[in-house]
Amino acid sequence: MFDKLVDVIVEWIKEIVPFVIVPQYEDGIILRFGKYYKTMSPGIYFKLPFFDEILTYHTVMTTLALPSQSLYTLDKQNVVVKGVVKYSITDVKTFLLEVYDAQDAISDMAQGIIKNIIISKTLEECTHTDIDSNLTKKVRSEIKKWGVDIQQVTLTDVAPIRSIRLINDNISNKIN
């Protein structure tokens, strides 16, 4: 209970202080009365207490681990694909105001592009090193409109898997 009271007091003090400091590794925006007012780079800025809302975000390079996907290659091989996206924020205004849950959007877009590339190649082609540069180019071109610069997309795992049918047709027919 005391912790909650301290948190409320700290937030109230932050709200009445007429300035904000943006650290070197962040950029931010000021929303005045809920509308975009100004973009902030690192430094000190004055704000109108209770009227300005400050939104900041880390703009340095970040990595995002993509969840594994089970896909079929062009030669009908079942593979599990896992990847990593390295990115940094170039336009914090676009990133914060025009994309809801940007990390999820980056992950979904990258996974979709990976899927499209993997299903159009054979297993042999999927293990070549040039696939990463192809992925990076395609993901970069799609995601730059969100104020994000994709440094690199890397497939960390491309492994063939066997699918095992737990119930085959003979057993299911005998049950019926």
Image (spheres, helix red, strand yellow):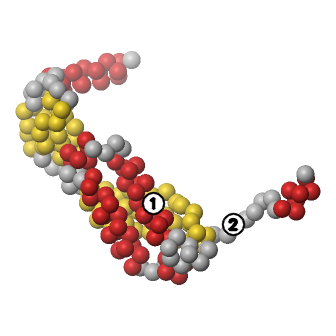
User: Which of these two is toward me, 61 or 132?
Assistant: 132
Residue 105 visible? The answer is yes
Left or right: where does residue 19 sit relative to residue 72? left
First along the sequence among labels 2 and 1 = 1
- Residue type at numbered disc 1: Gly
x, y percent for residue 172: 86, 56
Residue tagged by mark 2? 163
Q: Nearer the viewer, mark 2 or mark 1?
A: 1
Residue 156 visible? The answer is no
Question: In the picture shown, does residue 139 fall above or below 175?
Answer: below
User: Residue 87 sits in which quadrant?
Assistant: bottom left
- Residue type at numbered disc 2: Ser
User: Which of these two is toward me, 108 or 47?
Assistant: 108
Residue tagged by mark 1? 112
Q: Quadrant of the N terminus?
A: top left
In terms of secondary structure, where does tag 1 sit? helix
x, y percent for residue 67: 49, 57
x, y percent for residue 170: 88, 62
